[in-house]
Structures are given as C-alpha cells and as structure tokens.
Image: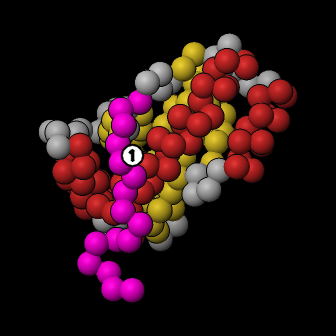
C-alpha cells in the first residue's frame, strides 16, 4: 500500500467509525479524529520500505523536566500497545501499525488504546506537573471494540 492509498483509506475509516464527514489532513499531515471524547490524530509515515500508520493523542502541554522523564518512564511500564513521550513541549501517547494491517478493527483498537491511556494517565500528569490538558475532562462513553475481528474464524 502506498502512502496516498493509506491516507485515503484512513480518512474513509475515520468517517465510518465516527459517523461523521471524511476528515482532511492538517498542514502537518495529521488527520484528526475524536474517539471516546479524546482528540486523536492519525498520520501516515514512510519508513524505509514500509508505510506506517501512527495514531497519537496529546495528553498535555508541558516542559521537559527530569521529574517528567521519570513519570513518563513509569507510564511506559504500564502501557500496552502504546508509548508516552515528550515532543516539542507536549506529552504524546502514540501507537503504530503497518498500513497493510489497517482495517476498521485495527484502527478502532489503536484509537481505543490511545483513549484509554490518555484517560488513565493524562489527568495525573496535568495534576502533578501543572500541565495544560490536551484531552476532554469527561470523555464520551464508548463501548470497547469486539475482542475478535469480524470475519475471522477461531
């Protein structure tokens, strides 16, 4: 899958997932999606011969300090399928997948894990470090995605 095809497919999947209009990428190439009340973004990246779909949310805006680095290390020991990092004055929670693995199930799972991680760790980072929240304080309740991808046999 080439990057243009992946971006078009992601935009279609987001429109279907959110029951909203087909989103446009911003000037940085980020495609916005609100999932479970959490503002997330999807970006298509070429890495060597691979096309990668990066999903990320902004937990908070804050300067980097040694205490924040320690806190992010603690967060990362608890995260599954995602990682937290400090980038350009903000804490992002991110996960990646290969574009070839992209389908409605895998995208919704990635966004679900991001929303869960942002809800779980964002408020604590904001409170502890006096950061500016990058998420909605009261997320919309959304049922978890199914445990089994549709159409697969067990």
Is residue 87 found left or right of 12 in the rendered image? right
The front one of 117 and 96 is 117
* Residue 24 appears in the figure: yes
In this rendering, would 3 be left or right of 79?
A: left
Location of the C terminus (image quadrant): bottom left
What residue lies at 53% left-to-right and 34% top-to-bottom? 119
Residue 90 visible in the shown view? no
| Along the line of sight, the residue nearer the viewer: 80 or 49 | 80
User: Is 41 placed left or right of 90 in the picture?
Assistant: left
Is 35 positioned to the left or the right of 65 in the image? Answer: left
- Magenta extent: 139-154
Residue 31's quadrant in the figure? top left
Magenta stretch, main secondary structure, is: loop
Q: Position of residue 88 (x, y in %)?
A: 61, 28
Q: How many marks?
A: 1
Q: How crowded is mark 1: few (under 14 residues within 10 Å), some or many (20 or more)?
A: many
- The N terminus - image quarter: bottom left
- Please state the horizontal and vertical placement of residue 99, each as a whole percent of the image: 38, 65
Identify the residue position indicated by label 1 in the image.
42
Q: In this view, does 103 lie above or below 89?
A: below
In the rendered view, would you say 37 is above or below 2?
above
Magenta region includes residue 65: no
SS at mark 1?
A: strand
- x and y percent of residue 153 in the render? 33, 86
């Amino acid at each position: 899958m080439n990057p243009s095809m992946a971006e078009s497919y992601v935009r279609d999947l987001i429109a279907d997932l959110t029951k909203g209009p087909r989103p446009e990428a911003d000037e940085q190439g980020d495609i916005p999606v609100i999932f479970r009340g959490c503002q997330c973004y999807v970006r298509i990246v070429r890495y060597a011969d691979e096309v990668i779909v990066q999903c990320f949310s902004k937990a908070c805006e804050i300067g980097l300090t040694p205490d924040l680095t320690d806190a992010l290390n603690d967060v990362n020991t608890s995260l599954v399928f995602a990682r937290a990092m400090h980038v350009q004055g903000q804490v992002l929670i991110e996960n990646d997948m290969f574009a070839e693995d992209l389908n409605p199930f895998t995208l919704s799972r990635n966004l679900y894990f991001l929303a869960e991680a942002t809800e779980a760790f964002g408020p604590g980072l904001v409170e502890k470090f006096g950061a500016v929240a990058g998420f909605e304080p009261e997320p919309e309740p959304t049922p978890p995605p199914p445990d089994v991808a549709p159409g697969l046999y067990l």
